[in-house]
Amino acid sequence: MNTGKQILALLKKDLLLERRQQHTLYGILLYIVSTIYVIYLTLDDPDAATWNAIFWITQLFICINAVAKSFLQEAKGRMLYYYTITSPIAFILSKLLYNAILMIAMSIINLMIYTAMLGNPTANFLSYSAIGILGGCGLGIIFTMLAAIASKALQQASLMAILGFPLILPQLMILVRLSKTALGEIFRNGIPLQMISLLLAFDILIIILSVILFPFLWKD
Amino acid sequence: MRFTWWKLLSIALLLYAVIGGLLLPVPELTQLGETIRNLYFHVCMWFAMMILFTISIIHSIKYLNNKRAVHDIKSKEYAAVGSYLGILGYATGAIWASYTWADPNNPAYASFGSIMREPKLIGAALALLVYGAYFILRNSITDIDQKARVSAVYNIFAYAMLFPTIWIIPRLLPSLHPGQEGNPALNFNDIDARMRIVFYPAVMGWSLLGVWIASLKIRLEILKEKKFSNE
């Protein structure tokens, strides 16, 4: 499958670049640590609801920073080069995959540092981390597509945030609700599963839309 | 003014909606009293807004298909008029709420906190924010073809994400709006027959008015483009 090989090659290129240059990784790591440290200094032993809310806010900001760095740093000539060697679908799928992997790693790091500094009021830590990682992935792929749209404009990073904020709100609300199951709140039977399938449906919708719409953005 | 049948129809329908809306009998609900007449304005404007946004996205899809600049102009103007109707809908909703939900003497009173958490308000704010972002995006790209292409892509993406959102959020939050077990104004059990005879014509009237305003803006824009390209 030619497209599959292209996707894997592009993904390998991105991961390799990341491992060699590493400034994205360390930059975001520093950002995570600074943000959580500020929160730690300002919040005095938060209760579960506040803890949950602030966690998702940090996830959101990490996602914006991580994805902005990955997409908006491509030089102009580089995009033309990619245009000649690969298909747009392979390109966007590899970007989505790369950002999903990046967000999984960042979510795990975020979770570890967050619980280390701000305590752990969760009843079921494993399910909370699973929700955190799933949420991070979902946020990552939506911001990838928005970064692709914003990369054509002038003030790119702030534009990405403006475009993104209304669109991630439903996902965030579902995620905050869902993480309450891990914090010990009891839900009716089947509701958490419904919410997870909603999230997955959202993610699939975004992927399909990206694959359909990215070829139009591709030609410069 | 070019006298077309649908412009005269829109005038007739809106006159009917305003006069009939204010004079014809309405069902008696103790919490709302006569303010229920606002339904013909507030809800109809939201519906008309949705219809105009749908026309906008159809033109965006057409633009991506055949790249004729007129489709880009049309999608932008329909989105603009739709946003304007959305702001009006928000304003009429706020006026309505000030007499019902925010008035402590009214049995339908709710605290300011619960009003702001009302899911339909959140959905409405999201819709307006999305189209606000659409206009900011358009302004931040200088090259005309790129502007048209990128804003068409964003229009389609945002619209496709917006509708599941508006469907999902009410199910996640408790609500003050009536008829939450389904789509309220389309729920046939919910809207009384006496209101329906004014409601549906009013929706058509507001939509046609929106189309009329958008068509004027489009004609103006096309004239401007022709003038610039002939200079």
Image (cartoon, grey):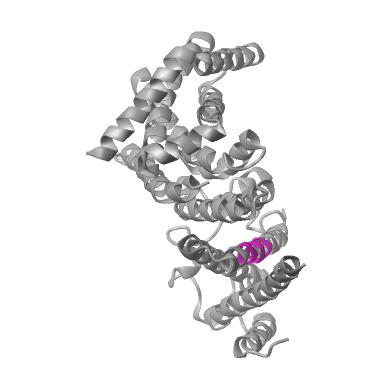
Residue positioned 45% across, 13% down in the render: A20
Give the percent coordinates (x, y) of residue B164: 44, 52
Q: Visible in this render: residue B59?
A: yes
Name, please, the residue furthest toward the left: A1
Q: Position of residue B161 (x, y in %)?
A: 47, 50
Main secondary structure of the magenta stretch: helix
- Asked if residue A15 is positioned above or below residue B104 in the image, the reply reads above
Query: Can residue B77 be found in the magenta stretch?
Result: yes
Q: Is residue A129 above or below residue A3?
A: above
Residues shaded magenta:
B76-84
Residue B204 lies in the magenta-colored region: no
In this view of the protein, can residue A128 be seen by the observer? Answer: no
Give residue B52's quadrant in the image: bottom right
Quadrant housing the C terminus of chain B:
bottom right
Instruction: Judge whether A29 appears above or below B41 on screen.
Output: above
**Direction from residue A41 to residue A78 in the image, left or right:** left
The image quadrant where one finds the N terminus of chain B is bottom right
B222 horizontally vs A54: left or right: right
**Residue B100 on image: x %, y %:** 68, 60
